[in-house]
Structures are given as structure tokens and as C-alpha cells.
Image: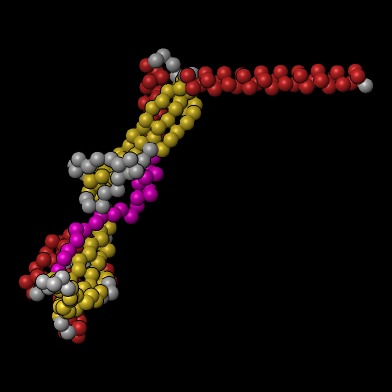
Amino acid sequence: METNRNVIVAALVGLSIIIFGLIVGNAYKFKYKVNNAINVTGNAKKDFEADIVKWSASYSKKSMDLSDASEELKQNRELVKRFLEQQGINPKEILFNAVSINREFAYHTDAGGNSSSTFTGYNLSQSVSIESKELDKVDNASREISTLISQGVELSSDAPSYYYSKLEDLKLELISQASSNAKQRAGNIAKDAGSSLGSLLKADLGVFQITGQNDNEEYSYGGAFNTTSRHKTANITVKTSYLAD
């Protein structure tokens, strides 16, 4: 019985020594790999043009009578719609949003510090928006929309916003190019050092950036996403670590 117990203890001790040796050996191998790693950052960028434009404008009318204000706003709507269609905008792409109605007051304070208010009328406003792939037509319309002011339309126009419908495809393309660029850089470093490039140890994707072309726009920590420029530049980085054999 005692002999069997000693055999078991000896076996456990031997197994522990083997496991400890494996742990030490793997730790050494890992340390060796880390110390012999080539760390590089690959980069890829591409210029492209947006293929979707979004644009909006708003107009308003004010009157002491709600019916009068509503009728005048309706007339403005027809003028805006006719103008946009004359610019070649597809009527299906023109969206008129719900009318907003506000009761407005003028506030007064008399010599005794007493406050009072006077009703000054109903202010009705409505916005119109367009989403289209006809960028030139929408751009021209946004620049010429101010001509409606001469027709009595109190109009406020926003700047167009530009988007790209194939953004995910572009991102995947740039990731592939940045990864290839990183591998090429690592290979050059290994060659110059008299070594050869081994297997990939680690790869981390950087932030996807979209900036306006020739705008000197700075990158953002969370990623830039330019919507004000029709012509843009996409940029992405990939941080990699390769084993040097």
C-alpha cells in the first residue's frame, strides 16, 4: 500500500515538472517572438466622389389669422414645388414635412414691474427635403433657390450634404490595401536587417477617416466623416506585428 502511494506521488511530481517545463518553454518562445517582432503600420487611401446628395430648406408665414397664414404657406409650397421641378428634380424625391404652428407673443414689463404679453400672430413653417443621386441638379437648385425670395417666399436653405452608397465596399477595399502595405513594409525592414519575414503575430484595424479633398481637414480620434464635400478622400490604417525569422 505504501509502495503504491509512493509511486503515485512520484508520478505527480514528474508530471508537475513536465508541465512547469512546458510553461517555461512556451513563455520563452513567446518572449522570443515578441523581442523578434517587426511592428509596422500600413496605410491606404482613395479619392472618390459622393453619389447621394441630401438637401433641405424651410419657409414660413405669419399672420394674425390662422387660416390666412395656412393659405399663404400653401401658396409658398406650390412655388417651391414648381421651382424644384423646373430645376429638373424628380417630384418623387421632393418631400414636404408636416407644418409647424407656433403662437407668438410680445412680452412687456411696465414701470411697476408687472409683466404682460400681447399675441402677435400665428407663425407657420414647413420644411422641404430632397435625397437624390442627381447631384448636379440638386446643387444647382440649392444655389438658385434664393430667387424665390423675390416672389415673397421667406426661405432658409441649408447646405447640401453628400454621401456614398458603397461605403462598406470601399472600406473593405482599403483594409485589404492597408494590410498589403503593412506586409510590404515589414518585408522591407526584415530584408534590410538581413532577416526574413515570418508569420503574422497580430493585426489591429485603425480608424476609418473620410475627409474633404484638399480641405486640410484634420483626422479625428473617433474617425472623421465628412458630409460637406462632394469630393472626398477615404483613409484607413492597419497596425501589424510580424515575426522576424
Closest to the observer: 147 or 168?
Answer: 147
Closest to the observer: 202 or 90?
Answer: 202
Is residue 173 placed above or below 159 in the rendered structure?
A: above
* Quadrant in which residue 211 is drawn: top left
* Residue 5, horizontal then vertical, whole percent: 87, 21
* Residue 101, horizontal then vertical, whole percent: 24, 76
Image quadrant in which the N terminus is located: top right
Magenta stretch encompasses residue 172: yes
Residue 77 appears left or right of 190: left
Magenta stretch encompasses residue 91: no
Q: What colour scheme governs how the chains and residues are painted in the rendered image of this protein?
A: secondary structure
Q: Residue reaching furthest front?
A: 112
Q: How many numbered discs, if any?
A: 0
Residue drawn at x 60%, y 22% is 26
Residue drawn at x 15%, y 80% is 63
Residue drawn at x 37%, y 16% is 192
Q: What stretch is highlighted in magenta?
A: 155-176
Q: Residue reaching furthest right?
A: 1
